Amino acid sequence: MSAPHPHLDTIARVARAAGLAPADPLTQPLAEARANAHAYQMLWNQPLPEIGGTEEVELPSPHGGTARLRIHYPDQRRDDLGVLLYFHGGGFVLNSIDTHERLMRLLASRSGAAVVGLGYTLAPELRFPGQLDEALAAIAWVRRSGRERGLDPARMAVGGDSAGANLALAAMLALRDQGVPLPSLGLLFYGMFSADLATASHRAFGGGRFGLTTARVDWFWSQYVADRAQRDNPLAAPLLADLSGLPPQFVIGAGLDCLLDDSLALADKLSRAGVANTLSVYPGVPHSFMQMSAHLPPASTAIGEAATALRRALTPSLPLAAE
């Protein structure tokens, strides 16, 4: 096990000074856990980076009601922009496009692409495959209406963190199986790709010392997939899927994360399936570390690495000198 990054002490001090701690939905009522998660994550959003602007669109949900789309423009341009459709993490139960605002803004400003965040309906109010259906509806919206908002649907990537990385990967699998055009790239940050809780990383890091616990992951799965037998559905647990035929994937793992083995196993399986992929594991940092970029240097480095991969994928002719 790598030593915890020294700046994690700063993270702990900042949180204590603000009187905040990560939410614990196992011991708190759901509404309270959501409010605590929102407050804790919003702490790391500050300061919000300046970008070219934001715009919100209401997306009809296939299951009734609406989901929010928030477009982050990297600068003042509003035409012919490559686009990343981003799905936030939170175990399918917590968080929102608000809690991930800083991360999405930085990806936009550093890549030159517009980043569109989907505020999907949370579990357990909606369960699998409801969130996946909304993710696919968001992809269809970009392809149908993106040009009206300055987006180039032909230059699109999908990505997300944790549960959002699950949705991004599952959406690419669903599109492949439907025989429709695939995005140019997947950006998958410390994903929740499998319900296997007996991995080495769960044994090493699942006790709670570094944040996310194995017990909490199991609870998240129970909220997302009501029928335990469906945890083996490859669109719910995409690590179990045939991964052949997918576009290139950029995978980031966190060295102190109980979900680390999900990312390691995914990269290995992608390689065996002949899918181009890059795996970048950051030692000494916990799950969700990329949201702490204002205080944690590896988070800023990881965002820059992901933004470079995105820029190259959406602008294939970009000369290396532009880096």
Image (cartoon, rainbow, N blue to C red):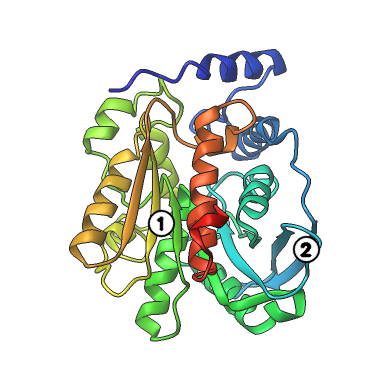
**Residue 90 appears in view:** no
Asked if 238 appears above or below 210 in the picture, the reply is below
Asked if 1 appears above or below 133 in the picture, the reply is above
Amino acid type, mark 2: Glu
Where is residue 197 drawn, in percent x and y? 27, 40
Secondary structure of the residue carrying tag 1 is loop
Of callouts 2 and 1, the N-terminal one: 2
- Residue 34's disc is none
Which residue is at 49% across, 46% downward? 305
Which residue bears the numbered disc 1?
A: 225
Is residue 169 rendered to the left or right of residue 317? left
Secondary structure of the residue carrying tag 2 is strand
Asked if the residues shown at circle 2 and circle 1 are in contact, with their CB atoms under 8 angstroms apart, the answer is: no
Q: Nearer the viewer, residue 149 or 172?
A: 149
Amino acid type, mark 1: Val
Mark 2–mark 1 Cα distance, whole angstroms, equals 29 Å
Where is residue 72 drawn, in percent x and y? 72, 58
Asked if 108 appears above or below 158 in the picture, the reply is above
**Residue 186 appears in view:** yes
Is residue 190 rendered to the left or right of residue 99? left
